[in-house]
Amino acid sequence: MAEEERTIAFADLSGFTALTEAHGDEAGTEIALRFYEMTRSVLRGGAVLVKTIGDAVMLAVPDSRNAVEIVLALQALTDSTPNFPILRAGLHAGPANEACHDYFGACVNIAARVAAHARAGQILCTAAVAERIADSHLCTAIRLGPVTFHNVHDPVVVYELRRASAVGTSIIDPVCRMHVTAESSVARVRRGTGDAHFCSVACLRRWLQEAS
């Protein structure tokens, strides 16, 4: 079992459960497989897709700059794909043990917890990653402060990474939680809190049924 310095990243699709509830398991499977292919398409610099876990992927990357570049590229790809869920991700850097084509240790555990802490559309990282990319101008790192995670002894200082070219407010189907555009949505309903856009007639019908 070899211990190596790695940046570990977890990324998943926010609202995936709502998507499968609205569109069925087959549609969810197709989205997940497409997400895996998107992930493979942006790998670089010795990065490894360690494993897929439902709607999530785990990456191990030799250095933090490449890891951040990959996750930002993946976010840009998912953001630009209509009728696709919103990405969220978390990264941490440190020593990790490699065994049986997988990685283990505190670095992996913290990265997973940081990813789980992210909201839809957020890329979060630890200070270890933020410090390593401070002079790279890849993105803006915004310090959010310390967070206490379950079974992690000390609070972890978390940063949000925002790419300069990030799009504005996303339009989210309120039923299946997929990203849609005004052009790709099949229906729009005006409401007091803002227009609701729907990716499909099925989502529109379900929303109307639940609203009645």
Image (cartoon, rainbow, N blue to C red):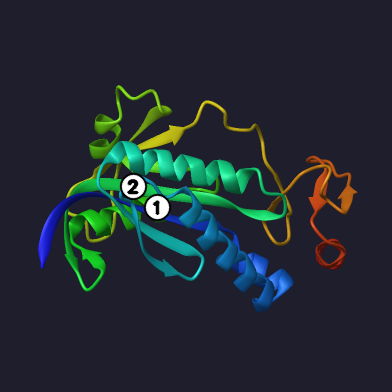
Disc assigned to residue 115: 1
CA–CA distance between discs 2 and 1?
7 Å
Amino acid at circle 1: Ala
Label 1 near label 2: C-beta < 8 Å? yes
Residue at 25 percent across and 47 percent down: it is 62
Q: Earlier in the sequence, mark 2 or mark 1?
A: 2
The quarter of the image holding the C terminus is bottom right
Label 2 residue SS: strand
Compared to 50, does 110 lie above or below?
above
Q: Quadrant of residue 176?
A: bottom right
Compared to 98, does 11 lie above or below?
above
Residue farthest to the bottom? 25
Amino acid at circle 2: Leu
Q: Which residue is mark 2?
A: 91
Residue at 35 percent across and 44 percent down: it is 67
Q: State whether residue 158 appears in this view.
A: no
Residue 121 location (% of width, % of height): 54, 44
Q: Nearer the viewer, residue 197 or 26?
A: 26
The quarter of the image holding the N terminus is bottom left
- State left or right for residue 197 relative to residue 32: right
Residue 6 location (% of width, % of height): 22, 50
Residue at 26 percent across and 42 percent down: it is 63
Mark 2 burial class by Cα count in 10 Å: few <14, some 14-19, many 20+ = many
Q: State whether residue 65 appears in this view.
A: yes
Q: Nearer the viewer, residue 46 or 50?
A: 46
Mark 1 burial class by Cα count in 10 Å: few <14, some 14-19, many 20+ = many
Label 1 residue SS: helix
Q: Quadrant of residue 4?
A: bottom left
- State left or right for residue 108 relative to residue 118: left
